Image (tube, rainbow, N blue to C red):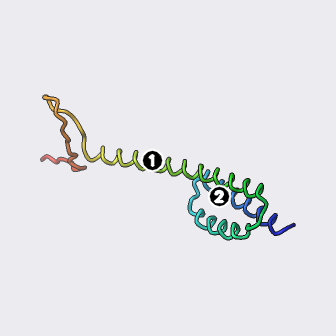
Amino acid sequence: MSEFAQTIELLEQVFDVERHAIRTGEFSGLAELATRKEALIGNLRGAPADALDHLRARAQENQRLLAAALKGVRAAQRRLDTITRASRSLNSYDALGRARTIASGGSQVERRA
């Protein structure tokens, strides 16, 4: 097996692992995979153009998956922020139609004797 073929096969394996990690939300290992990809890509100088095109397509597909995952995480963060803000105050309108915010009094329990 040529050096290019071996490097391409290793890169294919890294792309497969990366794709699985993105799809399952296991983001902690992505930095290590990026380091491995960089090292392998350095060995591709002079590789056939068709092989490079295939690898580029694989990398772009993983990039699209990662962008979609990031978009989902950001949407979840926004939703959690909305829920957190809603638990602290309530936006309402007074009798004249003016917006007003009613702050939450916290979780204090009124005690009467």
Viewer-proximal residue among 39 and 75: 39
Viewer-proximal residue among 96 and 112: 96
Q: Position of residue 78 (x, y in %)?
A: 40, 47
Which badge, 1 or 2, is on the more N-terminal residue?
2
Q: Position of residue 83 (x, y in %)?
A: 35, 45
Residue matched to label 2: 18
24 sits to left or right of 74: right
When asked about the image quadrant of residue 82, the answer is top left
Viewer-proximal residue among 101 and 68: 68
The circle drawn on residue 99 is: none
Characterize the local packing of mark 1: few (<14), some (14-19) or many (20 or more) Cα atoms within 10 angstroms: few
For the point 14% across and 46% down, the residue is 112
What SS does tag 1 mark?
helix
- The N terminus, quarter of image: bottom right
What SS does tag 2 mark?
helix
When asked about the image quadrant of residue 93, the answer is top left
84 sits to left or right of 56: left
Residue matched to label 1: 76
10 sits to left or right of 64: right
Disc 1 residue type (three-letter): Ala
Residue 113, compared with residue 42, is above or below; it is above
For the point 69% across and 70% down, the residue is 42
For the point 58% across and 57% down, the residue is 26
For the point 72% across and 54% down, the residue is 53
Characterize the local packing of mark 2: few (<14), some (14-19) or many (20 or more) Cα atoms within 10 angstroms: many
Disc 2 residue type (three-letter): Glu
